[in-house]
Amino acid sequence: MLYRPVGLILGLAGGAAASALFTQAWKAVGRGSDAPDALDEDRSWREILIAAAIQGAIFSVVRAAVDRGGAIGVRRLTGTWPGGS
């Protein structure tokens, strides 16, 4: 129960970090342009789907790293794994 507020704060920080990482990754992959939006009619299907795949991968990896790191931190502080019985 105590992990929930910590997890929420870590999730927000992780989301901000993932967004910044995606922006940098897209600048490298997308020839320096802004990432396309799904409703951007001037962008191709290929470009939009590649951007979505990269963004999804980055967000998933960052979320897993933040969740795991938070759980390890809670175990070190309390001696118990969050959500465990």
Image (tube, grey):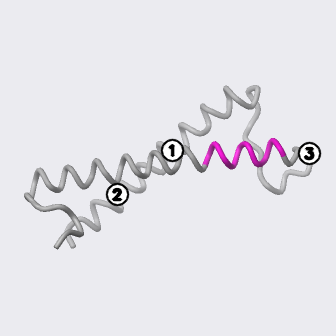
Left or right of residue 62: residue 84: left
Q: Residue 49 at what x, y percent from top left?
A: 76, 48
Residue 42 position by quadrant? top right
Q: Residue 26 at what x, y percent from top left?
A: 67, 34
Pointer 1: what residue?
18
Identify the residue at image location x=19%, y=50%: 73
Specify start and end residues of the magenta stretch as a single range: 46-55
Distance of mark 3 from mark 2, alpha carbons? 37 Å
Quarter of the figure that contains the C terminus: bottom left
Q: Which of the two discs, 2 and 1, sits closer to the camera?
A: 1
- The crowd level at tag 2 (other Cα within 10 Å; few <14, some 14-19, many 20+) is few
Q: Along the polypeptide, which appears first: circle 1 or circle 3?
A: 1
Q: Nearer the viewer, residue 35 or 81?
A: 81
Q: Along the polypeptide, which appears first: circle 2 or circle 1?
A: 2
Q: Amino acid at mark 1?
A: Ala
Distance of mark 1 from mark 3, alpha carbons? 26 Å
Distance of mark 2 from mark 1, alpha carbons? 14 Å
Which dot marks residue 9?
2
Q: Can you say whether 84 is above or below 17 in the image?
A: below
Pointer 3: what residue?
42
Q: Amino acid at mark 3?
A: Asp
Residue 80 position by quadrant? bottom left
Q: Are marks 2 and 1 in contact (CB under 8 Å)?
A: no
- The crowd level at tag 3 (other Cα within 10 Å; few <14, some 14-19, many 20+) is few
| Residue 47 included in the magenta stretch of the image | yes
